[in-house]
């Protein structure tokens, strides 16, 4: 790929590259700020990782449902997520468009982090995986909601990828936030009906859209609210 091709690629998939660039900047900032100890527990926390007790003690730290999307716990963690975002994210951005793609990426990540906050509050959690699972599930959800043959076929591929990853995750629960992945996927599936591409919006029955809006908002509030009263 020459420079002109790369420029066209960046212009076409600007949301994917902006998210990847911002995450890379945050990753480099972690090392500039904390040096070789950047991935220690305390410094991950200081960088914005999710830790439930901190939010319960100080509700103003609810921003920790957002920041973990951009914080990573190691080089392999960072590289795998960014390679996935760049190579698969571009395909999904083509389907949804830049603004909807970004909304799904961020909101699915928040949804997954909120589920983690409720179900495994004492886990220090970070990474873009919640958002990436949301993107995969959004394609599967769009195929389901619209019934479009092409989207259903792509959606089945992503659904298999999600299930395979979740099954693999069960063998290493010590380092992988499975509830974040499940939450991100659930959030992404619901968001596909809330932020469908314009061309496919008429194909989604109105009751599916309303159900998805109500379910997403209700569950998000429930995840966060129950975390404070358990």
Image (spheres, rainbow, N blue to C red):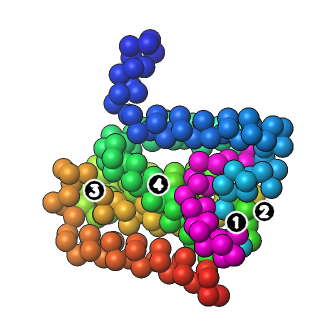
In the image shown, does 138 or 39 lie closer to the viewer? 39
Q: Give the range drawn in magenta.
A: 54-74
Tag in front: 4 or 3: 4
List the residue tagged with mark 2.
174
Please say if the residues under marks 1 and 2 sit with CB atoms less than 8 Å apart.
no
* Spatial separation of the CA atoms under disc 1 and disc 4: 18 Å
Main SS of the magenta segment?
A: helix
Please say if the residues under marks 1 and 4 sit with CB atoms less than 8 Å apart.
no
Q: Which of marks 3 and 1 is nearer the N terminus?
A: 1
* Spatial separation of the CA atoms under disc 4 and disc 2: 25 Å
Q: Is residue 160 left or right of residue 123?
A: left
Q: Callout 1: 10 Å neighbours few (<14), some, many (20+)? A: many
Q: Of the numbered discs in the image, which one, if any, rests on residue 51?
A: 1
* Spatial separation of the CA atoms under disc 1 and disc 2: 15 Å
Q: Position of residue 131 (x, y in %)?
A: 51, 54
Which image quadrant is residue 125 in?
bottom right
Residue 61 part of the magenta-drawn span:
yes
- The quarter of the image holding the C terminus is bottom right
Please say if the residues under marks 2 and 3 sit with CB atoms less than 8 Å apart.
no
- Asked whether residue 35 is in view, the answer is yes
List the residue tagged with mark 4.
106
Tag in front: 4 or 2: 4
């Amino acid at each position: 790929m020459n420079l002109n091709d790369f420029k066209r690629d960046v212009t076409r998939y600007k949301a994917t590259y902006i998210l990847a660039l911002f995450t890379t900047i945050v990753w480099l900032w972690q090392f500039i700020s904390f040096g070789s100890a950047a991935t220690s527990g305390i410094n991950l926390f200081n960088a914005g990782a999710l830790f439930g007790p901190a939010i319960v003690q100080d509700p103003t730290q609810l921003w920790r449902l957002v920041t973990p999307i951009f914080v990573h716990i190691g080089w392999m963690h960072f590289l795998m997520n960014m390679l996935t975002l760049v190579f698969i994210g571009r395909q999904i951005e083509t389907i949804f468009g830049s603004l909807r793609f970004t909304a799904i990426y961020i909101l699915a990540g928040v949804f997954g982090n909120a589920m983690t906050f409720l179900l495994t509050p004492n886990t220090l959690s970070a990474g873009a995986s919640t958002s990436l699972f949301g993107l995969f599930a959004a394609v599967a959800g769009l195929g389901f909601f619209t019934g479009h043959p092409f989207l259903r076929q792509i959606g089945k591929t992503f659904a298999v990828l999600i299930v395979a990853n979740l099954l693999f995750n069960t063998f290493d629960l010590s380092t992988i936030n499975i509830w974040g992945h499940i939450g991100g996927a659930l959030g992404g599936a619901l968001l596909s009906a809330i932020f469908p591409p314009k061309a496919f919006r008429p194909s989604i029955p109105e009751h599916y859209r309303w159900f998805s809006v109500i379910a997403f908002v209700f569950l998000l509030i429930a995840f966060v609210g129950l975390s404070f009263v358990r």
